[in-house]
Amino acid sequence: MKLKLMMSEDQDEPPDSPRKRNHSPASRCDDASSFRRNHFPDATEENWNDWHWQLKNRLTSASQLEKIVRLSDSERLAFQFASTTLPLAITPYYASLIDPLDPDQAIRRAMIPVASELLVAPDEAKDPLAEEGHSPVPGIVHRYPDRVLFLVTDYCSSYCRYCTRSRMVGRRKGASRKGWQQALDYIAAHRDIRDVLISGGDPLTLSDGQLDWLLGKLREIPHVEMIRIGTKVPFVLPQRVTPSLVAVLQKYHPLWMSIHAMHGDELTTESRRACTMLANAGIPLGSQTVLLAGINDSLEVMRTLMHGLLKIRVKPYYLYQCDPTIGSAHFRTSVSKGLELYAGLRGHTTGYAVPTYVIDAPGGGGKIPLLPETVVGRQGTNLLIKNFEGKVYAYPDTVENLGGNQSCSHSEVQPCVSA
Ligand code: SF4
């Protein structure tokens, strides 16, 4: 660590009485309404439900935040160095989910900087995935043979403190058709690119017109088979998911969406509505979750999130080991913790609820799946494999020995079992 800071948490009562976390639909509406009345008294319900209003009224400073939460010493200290770190921005909607009393609450930790963010560990890097080294033209990261990442904006409605792209997001470089043209030309010139993942920043912060133009240009390229959008909008700015946005998106099928989901506190009436609208438009929804220390690194929290996602028709897709970006040590867990959580899900719950646990290899090696050891050895031609309960079974791995074309059904071979 380059810098060590000592601090104590502020235990005083917050300025306003805390809102209890209770996500039954009625209480959530009550929570959001009372939050609006308390903190944005001039805003109408129509304002609150307007995504432009939400963006215009983002919380971007410590003084604005202090009216909503009592900042801890650690959070205050972080703000003294704010100019050197990722910008702060939280939509009023997402701020309404922050617990004003508890500095350890998941959404609060993800959004409000703490002093630990100022610490730089030796293994951390500004660009841990070496995206810039794999960028042939501005906006494109070409790491895998048949697909590219297309970074179309550096803007997000709310900034996650653990963001892998903290080096570039929120730098106000803007998004424009002119700026995207070189990337579009690159995709058009490379016939092996069949899959384009649009990300950023958050692409769903673009206007309907910008998205319509961009998706239309990609669809004009014959070899682009599928388009994916990576976004956190349904959970931080669900008001953005409007009938007109959905009408634009569904013109460009097959269109898939990967939604960044962090914690069950994000699963509200509003986010459910947004995901339902997207799913009803025929957009397959998958989630991407970063494993975060003290936020979602318990089996109970992870299971609640994964089950909750399935209930709003989002298939848990990836669970990422947190990337070693600058100032991320307080967010990172051990890999053994991730494997433990994976093992706690696999076999114990619906297979659809189990995401693939991956490390995005530092230096640009791509995503590498991690699995608890399930192949435990051989016994003659039998492969010994371990199930979710730790029991070992024998699989007759004899097909190659029999010449390849002969079948070997389970009913013909009795598995041997040991505890
Ligand atoms: S929404 Fe995604 S790109 Fe934006 S700050 Fe969060 S992690 Fe980074």
Image (cartoon, rainbow, N blue to C red):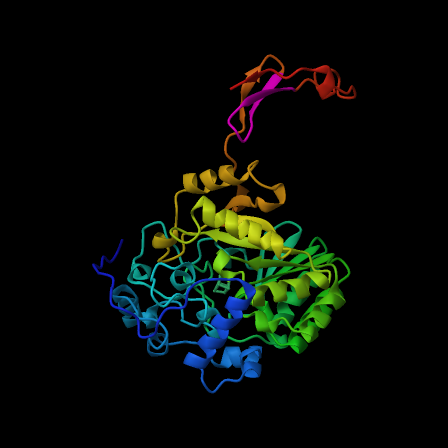
Which residue is at 43% across, 72% downward?
Answer: 89
| Residue positioned most to the bottom | 42
In this rendering, the answer to whether 85 lies above or below 53 is above
- Pick the front one: 310 or 215: 310
Which residue is at 20% across, 59% downward?
Answer: 6
Which residue is at 54% across, 68% downward?
Answer: 26
- Pick the front one: 72 or 211: 72
Q: Is residue 39 visible?
A: no
Residue 13, horizontal then vertical, whole percent: 27, 69
Q: Main secondary structure of the magenta part?
A: strand
Task: Identify the magenta region.
Answer: 382-396
Whether the magenta-drawn stretch holds residue 126 is answered as no
Which residue is at 43% across, 48% downward?
Answer: 297
Whether the magenta-drawn stretch holds residue 383 is answered as yes
Residue 211, horizontal then vertical, whole percent: 66, 72
- Pick the front one: 150 or 274: 274
